[in-house]
Image (spheres, rainbow, N blue to C red):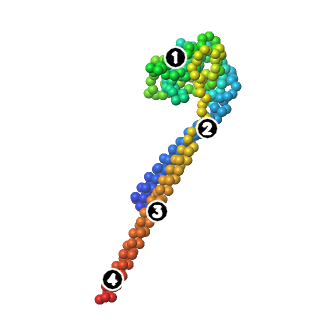
Amino acid sequence: MLRLLLTRRWLGYLALTVVFAVVASMFGLWQWDRRGQAVAAIEKVDANYDRDPVELSSLLGTGPLDAESNEWIPVSLEGSYLADEQVLVRTRPRSGSVGFEVLVPFQSGDITMIVSRGWVSTGASQDFPDVIPQTPQGTIQLVARVKPSEPLLRGRGAPEGQIASIHLSSLQEMTSRDIREDFYLALGGENPRPASAPLPTVRPELDEGPHLSYTFQWYLFALMAFGGLGYMLRQEVRVHRGEDVSRKASRDDEEEDALLDGASR
C-alpha cells in the first residue's frame, strides 16, 4: 500500500486531499470565530439591555466612548432635537418588512449626538415613508441605549436626506453641527411623550445561530476527505492484489499445460 501511495498519481491525490482539508479546517475556524462573536453579542445584551439607566454624562469621559463595550447600556439625558437636520437610513428590516430608520441630532449641553427615534415603513407608492411622525420640540428628557457606529456601505448610494447605514463619519458630513462620532443612541423613551412616534428599536434576538454545527460540519468534511482517500487506496490495492493472483494462476496453468504436453510426448 505504501509503495502505491508513493507513486506520482497518488501523491497528487494526497496533495489535493491535504489542500481540501486545510481549506475546510479554515472554514471551520471561521465559523467558530463567528459563533464566538454571536455569543459575545448575546452576553452583552444580557448584561446591559435591562440595566437601570445611568446619566450619559457619567458614562462619558474625557476621550471617546468605547461604544462596543458599552453597547445597549441605557442612558438618560436632557436636551433638544435639531429636527431640521433629520436623516433617514434606507433599507432597514423589521418583522419581515423593509422601511427607514429616523435619525435626528440631539443637543444636550455642549455635545451633539445622533439619536435613532425608530422605524417607519416604506410608502405605498414611493421609496419614501408616507408619514414620518413629527419630532418633538423644546426640552426633552430621553432614555436611550448606546450603539456604536455602523460600517460604511461602499457603493450604496442614497437620495438627498438619506443614508445607507448609520456611519457616523458620513453623518457628520450631512449635518451642520459637530456630532459625536464614537456612538449614537437608540431611543427607548421620550418625556414628554409625543402623540405619535416611529416604532422603537426591537430588542436583539438571543440566538447564536448555526455556527457551532457548521464548525463541526467543516471539520467532518476534512476528516471525510482523508477517509475517502484511504478507501480509494484500499480498493486499488485490492484490485492490484487480484490482478497478481490472476497472473499467478495463469502462470501455474501454463506450467501445468506444459508438463502435460511433455508427458504426452
* Residue shown at 53% from the left, 17% from the top: 132
* Residue shown at 66% from the left, 33% from the top: 46
Q: Which residue is mark 3?
A: 234
Q: Earlier in the sequence, mark 2 or mark 1?
A: 2
Q: Earlier in the sequence, mark 4 or mark 3?
A: 3
Locate residue 27 relative to residue 44 in the image: left or right.
left
Viewer-nearest of labels 1 and 4? 1
- Amino acid at pointer 2: Val
Where is the C terminus found, in terms of image quarters?
Answer: bottom left
Residue 219 in the image: state x and y as whole percent: 53, 49
Label 2 element class: helix
* Label 3 to label 1: alpha-carbon separation: 71 Å
Q: Which residue is mark 2?
A: 39
Viewer-nearest of labels 3 and 1? 1
* Residue shown at 49% from the left, 22% from the top: 122
Residue 148 in the image: state x and y as whole percent: 58, 27
Q: Which residue occupies the foreground of this view, 130 or 165?
A: 130
Number of numbered markers:
4
Q: Which residue is mark 1?
A: 131
